[in-house]
Amino acid sequence: RSFATQARSSLKIGLIPADGIGKEVIPAARQAIVALGSDIPKPEFINLHAGWETFTRTGVALPHETVEILKSECDCALFGSVSSPSRKVTGYSSPIVQLRKELDLYANVRPVVSVAPNAGEQPAVDLIVVRENTECLYVKQEQQIDGPNGKEARATRLITERASRRIGQMAFELAAARSRKHLTIIHKSNVLSITDGLFRETVRGVPALTGKYSDVTIAEQLVDSAVYRLFREPEVFDVMVAPNLYGDIISDAAAALVGSLGLIPSINAGDDFVMGEPVHGSAPDIEGKGIANPIASIRSAALMLRHLGYTKGADRLDVAVDQVIREGRYLTPDLKGTSTTQEVLDAVLGKL
Amino acid sequence: RSFATQARSSLKIGLIPADGIGKEVIPAARQAIVALGSDIPKPEFINLHAGWETFTRTGVALPHETVEILKSECDCALFGSVSSPSRKVTGYSSPIVQLRKELDLYANVRPVVSVAPNAGEQPAVDLIVVRENTECLYVKQEQQIDGPNGKEARATRLITERASRRIGQMAFELAAARSRKHLTIIHKSNVLSITDGLFRETVRGVPALTGKYSDVTIAEQLVDSAVYRLFREPEVFDVMVAPNLYGDIISDAAAALVGSLGLIPSINAGDDFVMGEPVHGSAPDIEGKGIANPIASIRSAALMLRHLGYTKGADRLDVAVDQVIREGRYLTPDLKGTSTTQEVLDAVLGKL
Ligand SMILES: CC(C)[C@H](C(=O)O)[C@@H](O)C(=O)O
Ligand SMILES: CC(C)[C@H](C(=O)O)[C@@H](O)C(=O)O
């Protein structure tokens, strides 16, 4: 990707902690990035607003300014997590869904990897969920009418050839770079024969279209049985590619396999922007207690840097995190430890 | 329900084995029902066709005759499982989805219960998924067009107040009858604020509307985190109520917790018909080998009989199955045993 290999004297990173523990873990990721020193271009951080709190304060969940600054000034970004209102609130719309769309971050890449007991060993769980990030039920075309038997609400699920092709290509690219080179297409075409049929056929068509990836083996799995098999035999999966909503669900399912959502990173990637984002939510129950797990955010920073071509910096972060987990001395309560966010961060920084 | 308490001299049961292992497990369930003797009205079985094989033979997946006989002659039915074509086939549409709609079997009730080591002990997993069975993306309104950037496919997701209310009422009814009396509403209203908003609000409105269920506690969980929590802490759930597709996925997730899909029964229930159905699929990989687990079908028969008011017969089947599982001598390969379908059936019959 062109933007990944640009020579940069500095790296401009937008920080959007948003709500809840996002405000605790994004600053931790920032410190981890700073600690990489000369392995990456000098980082410059720009703090940006979005989220439910921003909405309650300003009436807008994703300020125009945030999008503009990301587009015009930033090389990449880190997003925290958003809280949702517990009741429908007029005018509120999830800023993360909007950001993915406005920046055309069409691929949500979520590696779910357990930490092997000893360095160099094969982890028990090692897969990547590649989630289409712009369409499916996330186009948010919904209406409600008053019908003769009461209210009727309809939502549109959009699947296009174009979006399926580019997410398919991203998934094949990632699969081809792995040792198993195995891609599983997740769908529900036994019910959604047209929309999921288009997704499945388009993804399957990527090798013929590109003349590449002939060494990648292809499998398919209905989304319901994919969740079942994730629990029962996760080793059958290598790279999984899925439409938006299925991808949302299976990445949470996969996360459960490795002990905590607090470990799982993601990037939202487009052709000219990348935004790291921990997969966990805003966790209102532990907000402000200083015990949120910073690892998902640190790993998201690593994934973002890797996508930009800064392999060395990314590797250093990942290795440090793996060591801290393997040692098990500094873990937050989600991993049955008693450490604070700061203690885990300090442990990671100490390994860098 | 009126039809449940009818005095019957005989019980007319439609049998629709359909495809794959359906043809092995439905006959087993039939034998288990016959063995109940005078605990139920004399069973009469009517064999009916549907499925992928029926389609390849006749061009129709759900013959008109099957629906007519179910409606006019049967008190209830047992459905096996359907295979799906591996590519889109013009004119083929899943017969189980169609049957649920044509018979207005609006509730798909799926108890997921593990067997405690000793009789009388609390099982580790004990929950019920109550899945709306007629709408959501299952309305199968899909179109594809050729747009300027290639093909575009759209599907409609329908959520109505009427269907949400009746499934909500069924879920509250089931929750109220349990010791924990706890209902969790599954939705994704942070993205689908209108459709899932309607589902959530309508289900929440059931106690006020009916003046009942004030002793049932209500919780909510986004579908992605529901799958995560099912894996991590299934004990938080008692009864879960969900729109169609989420219900499909979370019932498979829950099934993974108890060892095998081959154990999980369901009923498709409407106001005047009930159809038992194992949750597993047609399992083409083991079809014809005589090793399919008959327990899901036997338990589906029990659930169907229970719904019809034949508690004694249902209890006898469930107790016999629990004993066979607890003893662990006769188990099919999905449960790491070496027994055949027939051996497991014989073991169950031996306990009746
Ligand atoms: C917060 C929510 C809108 C979001 C999603 O569904 O995409 C979240 O679950 C995620 O996975 O990033
Ligand atoms: C076979 C398929 C159409 C069906 C469904 O999605 O409802 C199955 O997965 C089920 O759960 O009964």
Image (cartoon, coloured by chain):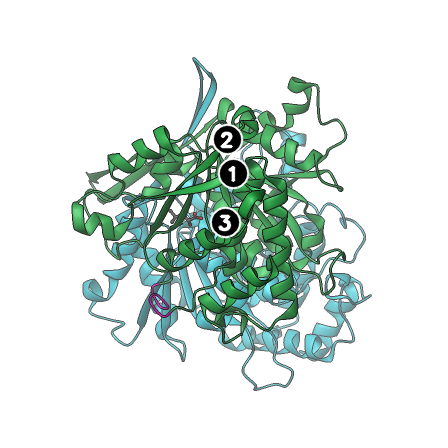
Chain colours: A cyan, B green
Which class describes the residues within 10 Å of circle 1: few (<14), some (14-19), or many (20+)?
A: some
Task: Give the letter of the chain under mark 3.
Answer: B
Taking the magenta stretch, the answer to whether it contains residue B85 is no
Q: Are marks 1 and 2 in contact (CB under 8 Å)?
A: yes
Q: Which residue is mark 1?
A: B41
Q: Main secondary structure of the magenta part?
A: loop
> Is B156 displayed left or right of A14 in the figure?
left
> Is B233 displayed left or right of B346 in the figure?
right
Kindly identify the residue that appears in the image at 40 percent across and 80 percent down: A179
Three-letter code, disc 1: Pro
Nearer to the camera, A128 or A28: A128
State the CA–CA distance, disc 1 to disc 3.
10 Å
The mark lying in front, picked from 1 and 3, is 1
Three-letter code, disc 2: Arg
Above or below residue A297? Residue B275 is above
Image quarter of residue B146:
top left
Tell me the number on the disc at residue B269.
none
Q: Do the residues marked 3 and 2 share a common chain?
A: yes
Please report whichever mark, 3 or 2, sits nearer to the chain's N-terminal start: 2
Task: Give the letter of the chain under mark 2.
Answer: B
Q: Position of residue A278 (x, y in %)?
A: 59, 57
The residue segment tinted magenta is B284-289
Tell me the number on the disc at residue B33.
3
Please report whichever mark, 1 or 3, sits nearer to the chain's N-terminal start: 3
Q: Position of residue B294 (x, y in %)?
A: 48, 60
Kindly identify the residue that appears in the image at 34 percent across and 40 percent down: A158
Tell me the number on the disc at residue B8.
2
Which class describes the residues within 10 Å of circle 3: few (<14), some (14-19), or many (20+)?
A: many
> Is B168 displayed left or right of B42 in the figure?
right
